[in-house]
Image (cartoon, grey):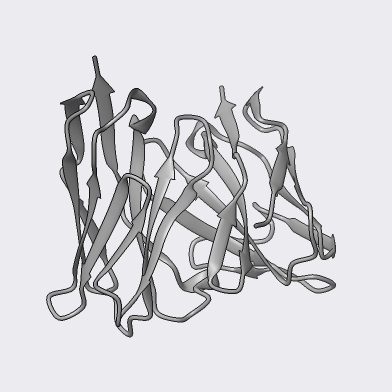
Amino acid sequence: SAVISQKPSRDICQRGTSLTIQCQVDSQVTMMFWYRQQPGQSLTLIATANQGSEATYESGFVIDKFPISRPNLTFSTLTVSNMSPEDSSIYLCSVADGVEQFFGPGTRLTVL
Amino acid sequence: KNQVEQSPQSLIILEGKNCTLQCNYTVSPFSNLRWYKQDTGRGPVSLTIMTFSENTKSNGRYTATLDADTKQSSLHITASQLSDSASYICVVSPFTGGGNKLTFGTGTQLKVEL
């Protein structure tokens, strides 16, 4: 199974600032994803992080707001830009390995 | 629209008791159904994965059932423990790997008390 770590685990940020979340996987994986989980809600896919090319965003999410990098097969970053209180959420990195899908511990973001 | 609905939304049981969580889905096509456990402040962890041809699958005290005809699944927890307190999420995939096509339920919040 893939072991995923995320940094930071939590943060409190001011409105208008940006935060970059890091995701590190202990093995090379092809498919890597970023999810958002708002309080009391199910997980929502933000984008698929593609190695060596631009991320593929889901409806309602744009690159200017959530730029993603994927420099290699074990690492990715998600930036939450120009934050507002509505961005307060848990952000989760996830990887697919065959049938299984694994999730990181999440980054709990609070925007004041 | 693909949907996964779970019930109950929340549940409180006494330690040692059994409970059953429900999941109804309208995802099509259908390849597999997964149950995840998410502890507070942690990411979801897979409990079971069932394809359309499987009726039941167990993982320790967790037993999942699937009726692909009625598009219903259940997760039965036997002899509950305090550590079972968590959110249980039903996830349906239209393809073998799932990837970016997973549909998540909103979860059932289970609390096990002494």
State which quadrant residue A105 falls in: top right
Q: Does any portion of residue A40 appear in the rendered image?
A: no
State which quadrant residue B38 falls in: top left
Examine the rendered structure and indicate whether residue A98 appears above or below residue A105: below
Residue drawn at x 55%, y 71% is B99
Q: Does any portion of residue B71 appear in the rendered image?
A: yes
Residue drawn at x 49%, y 61% is A60
State which quadrant residue B67 falls in: bottom left
Of the pair A59 and A44, the residue shown nearer to us: A44
Q: Please provide percent x and percent y for residue B95.
A: 45, 81
Left or right: B75, with A70 as reference point: left
Q: Residue furthest bottom?
A: B29
Left or right: B52, with B42 as reference point: left
Q: How many marks?
A: 0
Q: Please provide percent x and percent y for residue B76.
A: 22, 49
Of the pair A2 and A79, the residue shown nearer to us: A2
Left or right: B56, with A110 as reference point: left
Examine the rendered structure and indicate whether residue A60 appears above or below residue B62: below
Residue drawn at x 20%, y 41% is B9
Q: Residue furthest left?
A: B70
Examine the rendered structure and indicate whether residue A24 appears above or below residue A32: above
Q: Which quarter of the rendering shows the N terminus of chain B? A: bottom left
Q: Which quarter of the rendering shows the C terminus of chain B? A: top left
Residue drawn at x 71%, y 32% is A17
Q: Please provide percent x and percent y for residue A96.
A: 61, 66
Left or right: B76, with A47 as reference point: left
Q: Please provide percent x and percent y for residue B45.
A: 49, 48
